Image: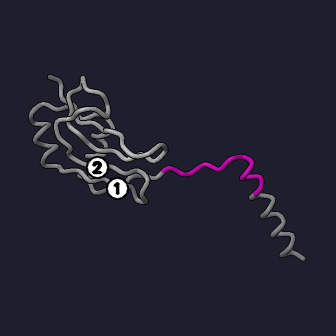
Amino acid sequence: MAVKIRLARHGAKKRPYYRIVVADSRMPRDGRYIEQVGRYNPLTNPKTIEIDLEKVDTWISKGAQPTNTVSHLIDVVRNGQPVVEKKAKISKKAAAKAAKAAEEAAEAAAE
């Protein structure tokens, strides 16, 4: 039996909340799992990561394979480093609007 430590998605549409679970690799992503070992909420600022490292180490010693994402989250928790936030991109329209507002503000200050 191949056992994986992976994310199971919960929460509403466009509001993801993940459980870190130990599951048989043949089970569906959000299906039956053996044990829950943590939680991950990417919507909070800073992102909330709660992992029981003792349980994770026990399962890894038994042969469970963490996915790439879960192994990254485990490393973040072990090192205590914050998760790097991505910069939010603004649309071209919003950038043009901001530039126009800055020009108008500069002209008003010059007068």
Residue sitting at x 45%, y 48%: 15
Q: Do callouts 1 and 2 mark residues in contact (Cβ within 8 Å)?
A: yes
Q: CA distance from mark 1 to mark 2?
A: 8 Å
Position of the C terminus, as image quadrant, is: bottom right
Q: Is residue 102 above or below residue 18?
A: below
**Which residues fall within the magenta stretch?**
86-97
Q: Position of residue 13 (x, y in %)?
A: 47, 43
Q: Is residue 50 above or below residue 32?
A: below
Q: Position of residue 2 (x, y in %)?
A: 18, 24
Q: Position of residue 80 (x, y in %)?
A: 28, 57
Q: Which mark is residue 48?
A: 1
- The answer to if 69 sits in the magenta stretch is no
Element carrying mark 2 = strand
- The answer to if 90 sits in the magenta stretch is yes
Q: Report which residue position mark 2 lands on.
A: 39
Marks 1 and 2, the one that precedes in the sequence: 2
Q: Residues within 10 Å of mark 2 (few under 14, many from 20)?
A: some
Residue sitting nearer the eye, 26 or 4:
26
Residue sitting at x 9%, y 33%: 62
Q: Residue 34 lies in what quarter of the image?
A: top left
Left or right position of 64 against 92: left
Q: Residues within 10 Å of mark 1 (few under 14, many from 20)?
A: some
The amino acid type found where label 2 is placed reads Arg
